[in-house]
Image (tube, grey):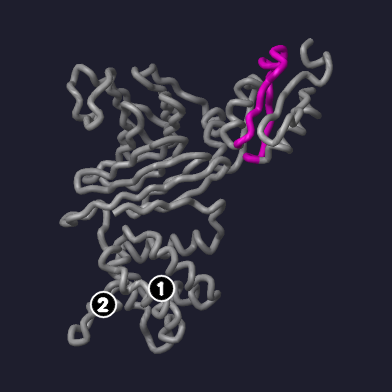
């Protein structure tokens, strides 16, 4: 079974809170304090109930779906006590009535929703596809507690199996904060290589055939097949003489395409700059206008063209809000003497505003 999930443009606080509760429910029974907190949260706003149910349906790969299934047991067979049933008390029944009613709408679809990736004994492995459009960014909590953040125009396939938690980066850029599980490795496949998490947070960027791996916390092992292999061959099953690997610690960066490049390490400031997209910022610290335009162009469908070669190497610095192209162009003009002309709805041309730019 495959689910295509297009991220919303932004996840509000209600959705984040619902995601956090769903993850806690998926982890097992709640204690009395946690049950009281959840009852209070559900009672505080009717949107909380709706969002929790919607998230439960969206995350049909989670154990909580099995918990929801227990709301519909055989009449003669009383259900065992679960995390949801800790909520049932004389004072809680009214608060949960609307939630149960909404969950009841899922009953007919529960058999197909209970196949959970990465769980032993499942006859069918589920694959989830997450993607963002141009200029969009978002985050999701995966079923194992790992967090996935997608940058602009990105797509990943998540396939949790008994032997590993596999993620396939089809394009764009993704950041992973990996939940530790020594018995179930977390592996990101991109191009000819794979990135194996060793308890870590890291990003992988795929642009054309070039892949960049950047470690934020912990360490990863990057392994690359140095020659073209059959399509069905995973990098870790390729002949030993075709594989090259490197282990990176925090701040480590490595590039690969057909071959694995040499690793280098970023200063904390440069690491923060490279991952600033997660906070919705472009941060430039002396990059050329050519490099800046290449980065900004990833976030818009408009083509930005430097028509004056004399300004291509102009050094740019500053903080900009991601996706706000007009504001960015205004700063180029007012702060760096670069004229931006909208030729049509699809093309913006950059040239020197006056002779000072090229001096």
Quadrant of the frame with the N terminus: bottom left
Report the residue that reaches farthest toward the top. Answer: 359
Identify the image quadrant of residue 201. top left
- Residue 139 position, x and y percent, is 48, 49
List the residue tagged with mark 1.
Answer: 33
Establish if 351 lies above or below 48.
above
Tell which of 119 and 145 is nearer to you.
119
* Residue 127: numbered disc: none
Q: Is residue 318 magenta?
A: yes
Residue at left offset 45%, top offset 86%: 94
Q: How crowded is mark 1: few (under 14 residues within 10 Å), some or many (20 or more)?
A: few
* Apparent side of residue 347 relative to residue 52 in the rendered image (left or right): right
Residue at left offset 79%, top offset 23%: 337
Residue at left offset 17%, top offset 55%: 123
List the residue tagged with mark 2.
Answer: 81
Q: Please tell me whether mark 1 sits on a helix, a strand or a loop.
A: helix
- Residue 352 position, x and y percent, is 78, 18
Report the residue that reaches farthest toward the bottom. Answer: 90
Quadrant of the frame with the C terminus: top right
Establish if 206 lies above or below 110.
above
Q: Does the magenta stretch include residue 60?
A: no
- Residue 33 position, x and y percent, is 41, 73
Tell which of 355 and 95 is nearer to you.
355
Report the residue that reaches farthest toward the front. Answer: 344
Tell which of 123 and 184 is nearer to you.
123
Cα distance in 3D space between marks 1 and 2 = 17 Å
């Amino acid at each position: 079974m495959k689910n295509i999930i297009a991220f919303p443009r932004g996840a509000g606080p209600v959705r984040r809170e619902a995601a956090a509760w769903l993850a806690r429910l998926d982890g097992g029974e709640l204690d009395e304090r946690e049950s009281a907190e959840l009852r209070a949260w559900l009672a505080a706003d009717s949107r909380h109930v709706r969002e929790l149910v919607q998230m439960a349906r969206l995350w049909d790969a989670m154990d909580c779906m099995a918990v929801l299934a227990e709301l519909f047991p055989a009449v003669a067979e009383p259900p065992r006590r679960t995390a949801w049933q800790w909520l049932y008390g004389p004072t809680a029944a009214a608060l949960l009535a609307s939630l149960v009613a909404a969950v009841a709408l899922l009953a007919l679809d529960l058999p197909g929703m209970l196949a959970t990736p990465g769980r032993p004994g499942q006859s069918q492995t589920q694959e989830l596809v997450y993607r963002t459009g141009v200029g969009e960014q978002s985050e999701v909590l995966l079923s194992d507690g790992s967090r996935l953040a997608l940058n602009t125009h990105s797509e990943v396939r998540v396939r949790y199996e008994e032997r590993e938690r596999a993620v396939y980066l089809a394009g764009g850029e993704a950041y992973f904060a990996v939940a530790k599980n020594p018995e179930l490795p977390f592996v990101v496949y991109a191009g000819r290589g794979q990135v194996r998490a060793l308890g870590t947070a890291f990003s992988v960027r795929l642009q054309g055939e070039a892949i960049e791996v950047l470690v934020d916390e912990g360490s990863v092992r990057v392994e690359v097949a140095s020659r073209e292999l059959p399509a069905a061959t995973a990098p870790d099953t390729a002949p030993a003489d075709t594989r090259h690997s490197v282990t990176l610690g925090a701040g480590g960066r490595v590039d690969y395409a057909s071959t694995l490049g040499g690793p280098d390490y970023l200063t904390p400031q440069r690491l923060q700059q490279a991952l600033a997209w997660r906070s919705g910022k472009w941060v430039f610290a002396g990059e050329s206008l050519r490099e800046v335009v290449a980065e900004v162009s990833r976030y818009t469908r408009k083509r930005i063209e430097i028509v004056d070669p004399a300004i291509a190497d102009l050094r740019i610095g500053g903080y900009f809000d991601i996706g706000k192209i007009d504001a960015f162009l205004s700063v180029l003009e007012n702060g760096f003497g670069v004229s931006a002309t909208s030729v049509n709805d699809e093309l913006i041309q950059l040239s020197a505003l006056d002779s000072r730019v090229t001096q």
